[in-house]
Image (spheres, grey):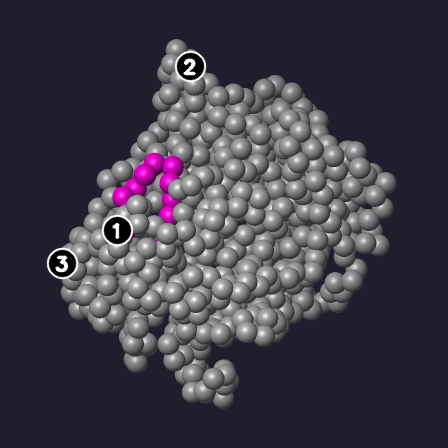
Amino acid sequence: MTQTAVTPPVARKVPSPTTIHGQTLEDDYRWMRDKSAPELISYLEAENAYTADVMKPTEELQAKLYAEMLSHIKETDESVPYRDRGWYYYTRTVEGSQYAIYCRRLATGPAYDDAEPEQVLLDVNKLAEGQPFMALGAMTVSPDGKKLAYTTDNTGFRQYTLHVRDLTTGADLADTSERVGSIAWAADSHTLFYTTEDEVTKRQNKVFRHRMGDAAADDALVYEERDERFNVAVGKTRDGKYLLMECGSHTTTECSYLDATTPGGVFLVIAPRVDEQEYYVEHRDGLFYIRTNDAGKNFRVVTVPVDGGGRESWVELVSLDPNVPLEDFEVFQSFCVSSRRRLGLPVLTVDFIGADGGLGESREIAFPEPTYSAGAQVNREFDTQMFRYAYQSLVSPASVYDYDIHAGTSKLLKQQEVPGGFDRARYGSERLWVTASDGVKVPVSVVYRSDRFKRDGSNPLYVYGYGSYGYPLPVSFGASRLSLLDRGVVMAYAHIRGGGELGDSWHDAGKMQVKKNTFSDFIATVEYLVAEGYGAKDRVAIEGGSAGGLLMGAVVNERPDLFSVVLSHVPFVDVMNTMLDASLPLTVGEYEEWGNPNEPDAFAYMRSYSPYDNLRAGAYPAMLVKTSLNDSQVMYWEPAKYVAKLRTLKTNGTPLLLHINMDAGHGGASGRYDYLKEIAFDYAFLLTQLGVER
């Protein structure tokens, strides 16, 4: 696909300079922030029309890709049921329906019995009727099993409404509230705690206590978090004995507890917050088990009796290991499970807990492939002899296992069925280590169809990256990916600094004043893959979204010659203007990830890589930039401004397309079929630009 004769829309320029620290930021498109302006909506619609015109020759390919992807999905399916307080809960999907149906059956014996009558808790398809968007947020059943509290968002702005359903009648009660985040029931099944967000910044900052039947206006304000870096959430220990209230920023947490049987009581702080220290709490037999990074960059586990004092009373249970960082710690009645990372790959270790609360025999769950994802699945039962975990890889579909802690064996409960002729043996995966520009070794996961991969530098190459917030990029199976692999595309996933694959130190090495490591790691990865024959130097596609969209913008500005095609989703590209506006959602809290541009050194560093501020006249790769009008995390105007400015600077004829979903939010379309069509659209653009046979 080459640039067509169709003329792209031209955005009006209105110079709106900002001067700070003696430097001026030029911005000709600030006017796009006015979402109510008819001119803005007309402009976005014109961009969509232009994109549709340019993509029209690919409509047949889009339909073909969609059909392929659909053929690899078992449309009518059911999840593995999990047990919780006398019931088995599961979700199922029905062919032709966009959304899941949440159900349960009574647990009448030690094993799930599908002969028991099914009770439908929530049919999201019914909730979505008449709505252009529907997302389910929090969802929790009361301890007595008779009520369901849940939240819904019908715009994509991640603004959730609380509902409570009477499970004996199936009717929603009058109890409701707006802008709700987390929810947790007290033991009496009559009291519900919930958090709400600030209307401007969308920060979860208040905790309320609601008694069933009361009006929301009468709900008691339990706590208000006034530090703008922090959000607050409510939850519960796995044994159900304590309600937890956690206040957290990107680098610091504080947790308070309340006996679940006394909901009218006061939450007590376990340990006061200390900057740059996090801790996370579970409970067992009068002890709090606390995962904390108080002793270094990574985490250890300590215990302290309930009401037993602050940090000075903490007793170490699991020591810090910088080489195998601890990511999570799950506590059960007779055992615990540590989730770690070894060389960037997940490791699950089961330890028995002795009568004194100490650890006994230890067993590691083994995984067979060179690169994979594994982690805890749904484990609601506290007193159990089974640990449920999930496993998948780039070539192995998602699987659910039960691990018998006494036998030391895993039982496969279900593997995702992939119809349409999928044969795992046709595909290969590798784990590579790439040397970055400063000598650091960066892990990369690669997958390909073995009979189409030549390793002679002729294959089209796709590289995905994120590298922010300490988020480990999942090594997961994707049925839609088969449409690229079967056409000979080699696909790579770069585990670059800023992510969490190698622990907190890996995150710290790619944020704040060393953020550029994220970008140089990605560039080094692409250069290595091309040099080693994994892909053709003139057939390289890259993709990233949100903070990964920042990555896309930064590496394209630095090395536009290295890439042929760019897919950029909801990209955080207007770094300076966003981070200088404290009224926007997320901004203040994000100072701990990117820096505070009100400080001169941070300003200079952030400006040096901000994609919008570093666009220059020259040739750019083919680009498809996607966003949503109701995105609450990366506002629609960032990608819109970025594309408008780039149009005035781009000197070559490769396509530059902006597609905006007018009815969705940060994650795109909410329905599963609509979402598949979005992927088919993206892949059609990518394949056409790479010159891949259809």
Tell me how many marks there are. 3
Residue type at numbered disc 3: Asp
**Helix, strand or loop at disc 3?**
helix
The structure residue drawn at horizontal position 49% and vertical position 88%, both measured from the top left corner, is 115
Question: Within the magenta stretch, is there residue 275?
Answer: yes
Dominant SS type (magenta) = loop
Is 350 situated left or right of 282 in this image? right
Residue 616 to residue 116: above or below: above
The residue that mark 1 highlights is 309
Residue 166: horizontal and vertical position, in percent? Answer: 28, 75
Disc nearer the start of the sequence (3/1): 3
Please tell me the numbered disc located at residue 218: 3
Residue 276: horizontal and vertical position, in percent? Answer: 38, 37
Q: Quadrant of residue 579?
A: top left
Measure the C-alpha gap from mark 3 to mark 1. 34 Å
Is 84 situated left or right of 72 in this image? left
Measure the C-alpha gap from mark 2 to mark 1. 52 Å
Name the residue nearer the viewer: 552 or 145: 145
Mark 2 surroundings within 10 Å by alpha-carbon count, few (fewer than 14), some (14 through 19), many (20 or more)? few
Residue type at numbered disc 1: Gly
Give the magenta range: 270-281
Residue 88 visible within the image: yes
Residue 198 visible within the image: no
Please tell me the numbered disc located at residue 24: 2
